[in-house]
Amino acid sequence: MLAFSDPDVIKLLRDEYVPVAVDDWYYRRKRDAEGEFFWKISGSWGSVGDGETRQQLTCVTAEGRVLSKKNEGQFPVQVRERLRQSLFEFKSLPKAERAPRSAKVEPLKQRDNTFVPPKPSEGGLILKVYTRGLDRNSRGELTHCNLDREIQERAQLNEIAGADYYKAKEAPQPDRLWITQAEWKSLVPADPRKGASFPLPESIVKRLCQYHFFDDTWGLPLPWGDGDTRSARMTLTIQEVSPAQVLLRLEGEAVIANASDLSKAGRGYQPKILGSLCYDRTRSAFTRFDLVAVGEHWDNDGSGAGRMGRHPLGIAFELAKGDSPQDRLPPDTTRGGRLSSYLGQ
């Protein structure tokens, strides 16, 4: 179990704290009062910090007094202890500093809009994405991955400080996929007929292959290069048509690699893709948009952010309601001004 799924951690945060989550990538680059406060509580102010991550759990008072900070958000035991210790330190502060409204916050006079997380487009779809490393058992069947061997090898090379950190990477890693309103509306013909087939729009195919079909279970890789998608085929077939709904099936496959000769490619992914979509004709909206990609992923040159070597990888997509802050987070690979390229604009 990861820290923020732990019932005791959740209770502590709800009862004793005001949880605030910000994207380190954007806030460490901001040049305004918000960015200055972020650097005050996380590190030295004034550095652009391209290679200086500030990913951490920080317990801080409203005035900016740091009670504790450390990058250990995966581990329930450490997080529980840190929250309790920081709460004890807060309650030991002078009463005046703990009083409601004791911190004076001036109105924000100037906002740095250079680095602001993008928002979903009006009327677009949001799909939740879950990437998970897989293994095969003695019968060749797919199973959840087990990193014990990799952990042991890395420990022998003194490349890791603790096994718990890497065991956490057996869990699914989340992301979001954005589909514009124009794109999803093009998926249902004006006169749908059972058995009709047509290709998935090229813009969605490219987005899936370049920005989502990779192993991000150990970190965040850069998107694939423009020429790295060696082949991709994704076809929609109408399975059922009624006055109430249209059911569609998606089938396809892709070959993505950082060299045209796969035998020489240091990194690549060859997934099969299946999907099931349901379009509600009365609401003019998709009510189901399930996709899954499963295939062999390899990283032999260290250019990715997943497991080294060759292993099966699964990536699942499902329709999000889009009404929670988590759902509306931007796709990870849109950082660095990549939104226009991500959307094919």
Image (tube, rainbow, N blue to C red):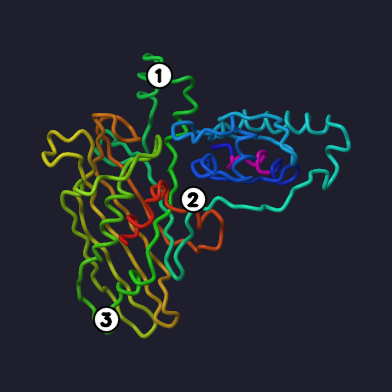
Residue appearing at x 83%, y 29% in the figure: 92
Give amino acid for label 2. Thr
Say whether residue 232 is left or right of residue 75: left
* Labels 2, 3: front one: 2
Tell me the residue that label 3 is attached to: 192
Q: Nearer the viewer, mark 3 or mark 1?
A: 1
- Label 3: element kind: loop
Q: Nearer the viewer, residue 313 or 239?
A: 313
Q: Nearer the viewer, mark 2 or mark 1?
A: 2
Q: Kindly identify the residue that appears in the image at 49 percent across and 21 percent down.
A: 162
Q: In the image shown, does 340 or 83 lie closer to the viewer?
A: 340
Q: Which mark is residue 114?
A: 2
Asked which secondary structure carries label 1, the reply is loop
The CA span between labels 2 and 1 is 36 Å
**Residue interval drawn in magenta:** 4-10
Relative image position of residue 315 (x, y in whole percent): 34, 49
Q: Which mark is residue 282?
A: none
Judged from the image, the secondary structure of the residue bearing numbered disc 2 is loop
Residue 257 sits inside the magenta stretch: no
Residue 25 lies left or right of residue 192; in this view the side is right
- For marks 3 and 1, the one nearer the N-term is 1
Q: Residues within 10 Å of mark 1 (few under 14, many from 20)?
A: few
Residue placed most toward the observer, 79 or 312: 79
